[in-house]
Image (cartoon, rainbow, N blue to C red):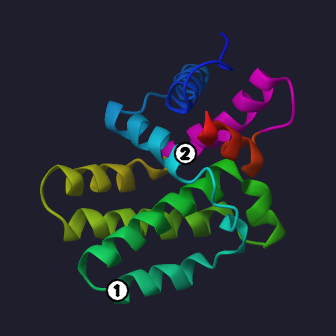
Amino acid sequence: MDVRTGTAAQLWQSSLVHVQQRLHLRLSENQESYLVFLLIRHARDVALGGRTMALELLQALEAPGGVGDDRLRDVGDRCLLLAGLFPGLRHRRHVDAVYYQHLGRTAYGLLGERGQGGLARLYAELACAYGDLVRVLLGLRGETGAAAGAAPVTLRDMAVLGNA
């Protein structure tokens, strides 16, 4: 399968489908779509490894309304990336994946509790499936590297795909 042509969304989606098949794991359509847009949205987050996620979670809880919700979403998203796509960043900080999974699951869970309607259900679903999302991203590391014939995905790779 050639995953080197198409839009950024098509490239990420194709890679995610292939990883799920390889892992014998199936995310819901909502979860898969969320991951695609998360990967695109955070493609240029060059400060990802320097963030203190617990502090960002506390700041999100103190922020009012929609701003706090946006920050909670960002905490959930960034923790997902650190736990699954960039384990090297967390290793350098001497933090294990469980830390990021707990913080990220908490952020999404709070969004599920705070909100209402479809978006709240989506975040509650993401919180419940957090471990599977991390496994898919870990699998994506190998998938992206194998497809490109190079090392696993890096922040620079994400930025290039974000420009596609």
Is 6 left or right of 85, judged from the image as shown? left
Q: Which residues are magenta?
A: 132-152
Screen quadrant of the N terminus:
top right
Q: Is residue 154 shown to the viewer in this render? A: no
Q: Is residue 135 magenta?
A: yes
Residue lying furthest left in this view? Answer: 117
Residue lying furthest top in this view? Answer: 1
Earlier sequence position, callout 1 versus callout 2: 2
Which secondary structure lies at badge 1? loop
Asked where in the image residue 18 lies, by quadrant, the reply is top right
Q: Residues within 10 Å of mark 2 (few under 14, many from 20)?
A: many
Compared to residue 87, the image places residue 11 above or below, namely: above
Which residue appears at 59% of the width and 26% of the height?
A: 15
Q: Position of residue 4 (x, y in %)?
A: 68, 20
Which residue appears at 56% of the width and 54% of the height?
A: 42
Which residue appears at 58% of the width and 26% of the height?
A: 11
Main SS, magenta residues: helix
Residue lying furthest front in this view? Answer: 163
Residue holding disc 2: 39
Q: Residues within 10 Å of mark 1 (few under 14, many from 20)?
A: some
Q: Position of residue 81 (x, y in %)?
A: 60, 54
Which residue appears at 27% of the width and 74% of the height?
A: 66
Which residue is more in the foreground, 156 or 112? 156
Mark 2: amino acid: Leu
Mark 1: amino acid: Ala
Q: Position of residue 7 (x, y in %)?
A: 54, 26
Residue holding disc 1: 63
Screen quadrant of the C terminus:
top right
Which secondary structure lies at badge 2? helix
